[in-house]
Amino acid sequence: MSDLENGMLVQHASLGLGKVVAVEPKAVHVFFAGSDARFATKLRLPMALPLLTPAASASGWLSGLSDFALDTKTGRYGLDAAWLSHGDAVTRFLEVFPKGFEDPRCVGDGSEKRERAFRWRRAHEAYRETLGGGEGERLLAAGDVAGLAERALRVERHVRPLHRDAERASFEDALKTLGAAREYFAALFDLVAAPAPERSSFEALAAAVAAMVPEGSPESGWPMTTLLPFVARPDVHMVLQPRFAAEVAQRLGLELAYEPQPSWPTYAALLRSTEVLLEKLRPLGARDHVDVDSFMHAVTTKPPRPRPQLRLVKGAAHPRSQGEGERRP
């Protein structure tokens, strides 16, 4: 392999899958998927070339990982200092919920206003009881859009403490326009009925939301587009709250490809990342995207622990953190 470019995915003979983040005349910096360090590994050229081969472009979160910056003191390229490896994130989660997703505090009992998992699951049950099993489609066929809106808002009330007041007000106001709401519910039911999320159905729902709130900000469309699909099918769908999603993507290194207005590329990237994360969390008892949402909130809202500072002592061996030293191929 001779042509290395920033952003390309490569496979190293022993270090595994990685992403090239910088190329220098005598070195290449590669961030490896299995790394627990925020810094890319520096490999010497040309010795590393025989050990590197191109990798497939469709590789989940790694392909979208970006924002590497040069640390002038070390000459290394790294993610933001607030970035957490998966191991660090799990450690932080277990500090909050020692029994994982079965921890009573994680499951919740409704006693606290912002119990995420409890409220999402109550909303899911309310959706099943009021709109599931074909009931929503029956009301739509009968032309009872007002009844659909009332039931949707009843479901949404379970999770009101979990999203901003402005988003809630827009949702309530939007559903008052019955003609536009009819298109919204038709697209919603098509999307959640599919075994897996489909681009055409998602884009139809996003278009219906845009028609309901033509003067709303682009970002306000994301919660309205993704909230009820997530509540209805947390096994395959995910809610996207713009500010929080951007923070999670930065802290956990998740692919997002964020666009301010609802778009399929952003939503598909989010789902790829959360599916990868869900599989990693299953040993802790994670079942669906409700648990992924709880995990993301637990590890990003807990104040970060200060990173230990290494101090050089004259005459002592130079200490190295795992993954942060220059490697020979």
Image: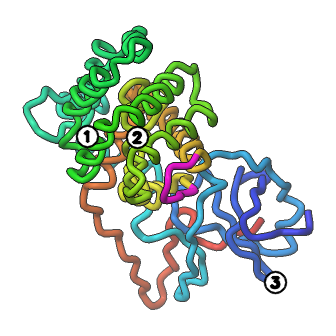
Q: What residue is rendered at 35% in x and 32% in y?
A: 178
Color encoding of the figure: rainbow
Label 3 is placed on what type of residue?
Pro
Front residue of 155 and 49: 155
Q: Is residue 259 visible?
A: yes
| Magenta stretch contains residue 260 | yes
Q: Earlier in the sequence, mark 3 or mark 2?
A: 3
- Real-space Cα separation, disc 3 to disc 1, in angstroms: 58 Å
Q: Earlier in the sequence, mark 2 or mark 1?
A: 1
The local secondary structure at tag 3 comes to: loop
Q: Which residues are magenta?
A: 257-263
Taking the image as shown, residue 291 lies to the left or right of residue 194, namely left
The local secondary structure at tag 2 comes to: loop
- Indicate the position of residue 180 as horizontal and vertical percent values: 42, 36
Quarter in which the N terminus is drawn:
bottom right
Check the image and name the residue furthest to the right. 2
Q: Earlier in the sequence, mark 3 or mark 1?
A: 3
- Indicate the position of residue 88 as horizontal and vertical percent values: 40, 52
- Measured along the vertical axis of the image, is residue 31 above or below residue 167? below
Q: What residue is rendered at 53% in x and 62% in y?
A: 322
Specify the quadrant of the image occupied by residue 154: top left
Dominant secondary-structure state across the stretch colored magenta = loop
Residue on which disc 1 sits: 172
Q: What residue is rendered at 25% in x and 61% in y?
A: 303
